[in-house]
Amino acid sequence: MEHTNVSLETYARLCARMADTGGDLEREYAIAGAEGVARTDWTAAKDYYTAKMQDPSDMGRTAMAFMPLFQAAQAEMRGGGEPGSLEMFAKVHAEMTHRKDPSDPSKKLDHMVVIAENGFTHARWLEMESFWTPRVGSDEFPEFDPELAAKFRELLQRETDRVLGIER
């Protein structure tokens, strides 16, 4: 595997800025160029880090180093605020879990449909999920907040009831 001239920190920052490019190479090149990274260096970095993160012998080390850098870059881009409200997170979560496919009610509605209907791209939903999950999901995470977790459970129940048509 070849090396790259692009540091993992720079790669993570570029990936955050490219979250909504949908794989459009020309848009990626423009973003990389604005950050002082040449096309060939961006392509080499993308190939290198993708291969490293998929390499079983790396044992997830590169991915584990990448995620906090990527999340920090996302937070910086949004000025440190939330990527979306806890209420919206609960709404989308309930819909992804409980909405049925209208063409086959025995199956859940495709989560990508739910994400799009709620105004998210897949990348933006993943940003929302990676922001809220450690805060409300489990006390295994350092960011966990028991008050937010309790609020999330209430919101999730309300949204689940709405989706399922249950009145309380």
Image (spheres, rainbow, N blue to C red):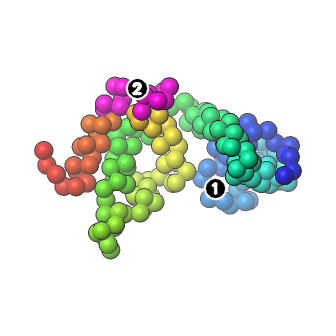
Asked if one can make out residue 109 in the rendered structure from this viewpoint, the answer is: yes
Residue most extreme to the front: 57
The local crowd at label 2, few if under 14, some if 14 to 19, many if 20 or more residues have their Cα within 10 Å, is some
From what the image shows, is residue 100 above or below residue 30? below
Residue 73 in the image, given as x and y percentages of width and height: 64, 36
Q: Mark 2, mark 1: which one is toward the viewer?
A: 2
Tell me which residue sits at (61%, 50%) in the image: 19
- Magenta stretch: give its range: 138-151
* Of pointers 2 and 1, the one earlier in the residue sequence: 1
Q: Check disc 2 and report its element: helix, strand or loop.
A: loop
Q: Which residue lies furthest to the left in this view?
A: 168
139 relative to 4, above or below: above
Residue 145: give its label. 2
Number of other residues with Cα within 10 Å of mark 1, as a class: few under 14, some 14 to 19, many 20 or more: some
**For the point 62% across and 59% down, which residue is it?**
22
Residue 47 position in % (x across, y down): 77, 54
Mark 1, secondary structure of its residue: loop
Q: In which quarter of the image is residue 145?
A: top left
**Percent position of residue 99, x then y:** 31, 59
Classify 20 as above or below 168: below
Q: Position of residue 58 (x, y in %)?
A: 73, 44
Mark 2: amino acid: Asp
Gap between marks 2 and 1 measured at Cα: 33 Å
Magenta run includes residue 142 = yes
Q: Name the residue under label 1.
A: 21
Nearer to the camera, 149 or 72: 149
Q: Residue at x 43, y 28 (%)?
A: 139
Kindly identify the amino acid type of the residue bearing the numbered disc 1. Thr
Task: Left or right? Give the position of 121 relative to 138.
Answer: right
